[in-house]
Amino acid sequence: MATPAFEEIAETFEFLGDWEERYREVIAMGKAMPPMPEALKVPATKVTGCASQVWIHPEIQGGRYGFHGDSDAHIVRGLIAILRALYTDVPVAEVPKVDAQAELARLGLDSHLSSQRSNGVKAMIQRIRESAQQAA
């Protein structure tokens, strides 16, 4: 059920050798992601449960999900970019049905993130699901 943008990431990761190359790719994705407007970095958009500072602001247009996101950590910013690829343009009602953990496992991220980072990713996914359910 992954989006074409996420499938493209999965294909890229298949060709990357070791975790160090994948780690660099995640950071590069974060650097390439459009910046989140500073006005959206408010307590209401801050994600709790992350070791670094993370903000997620949903944008629902035409019944389809999207969000702005940012972090003060390069790797986390890259993880946000991956989640944006996974969820952007998905119908709002379908967002909670996306098995994000399984999709991220396809990239090998599940076994290479620290427990703190894994918990942060889970918190981001939870925030995305909750915002979609509120919008539905």
Image (cartoon, rainbow, N blue to C red):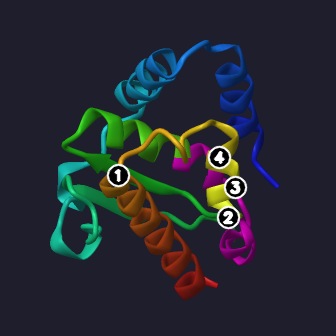
Q: Which mark is residue 102?
A: 3
Q: From the viewer's perspective, is 92 left or right of 19? A: right
Q: Determine the secondary structure under disc 2.
A: loop
Q: Residues within 10 Å of mark 1 (few under 14, many from 20)?
A: some
Q: Residues within 10 Å of mark 3 (few under 14, many from 20)?
A: few
* Residue toward you, 54 or 119: 119
Q: Amino acid at mark 3?
A: Ala
Q: Label for residue 133?
A: none
Q: Residue at x 30, y 56 (%)?
A: 116
Q: What separation in Å lies between label 3 and label 2 (alpha carbons)?
A: 22 Å
**Lower sequence index among marks 4 and 2:** 2
In this rendering, which labeled residue sits more in front, label 1 or label 2?
Answer: 1
How packed is label 2: few (under 14 Cα within 10 Å), some, or many (20 or more)? some
What is the C-alpha distance between the residues marked 4 and 1? 14 Å
Q: Earlier in the sequence, mark 3 or mark 2?
A: 2
Q: Which residue is mark 4?
A: 105
State which quadrant residue 58 falls in. Answer: bottom left
Amino acid at pointer 4: Ala
Q: Answer yes or no: do the residues labelled 4 and 3 have beta carbons within 8 Å?
A: yes
Real-space CA distance between mark 4 and mark 2, rounded to the nearest whole angstrom? 24 Å
- Say if mark 1 contacts mark 3, CB within 8 Å: no
Disc 2: which residue: 64
Does 61 sit above or below residue 77?
Answer: below
Q: Magenta-highlighted stretch: main secondary structure?
A: helix
Distance CA(mark 1)–CA(mark 3):
16 Å
Residue placed under numbered mark 1 in the picture:
117
The boundaries of the magenta stretch are 83-98
Between the C-alphas of marks 1 and 2, the distance is: 27 Å
Q: Earlier in the sequence, mark 1 or mark 2?
A: 2
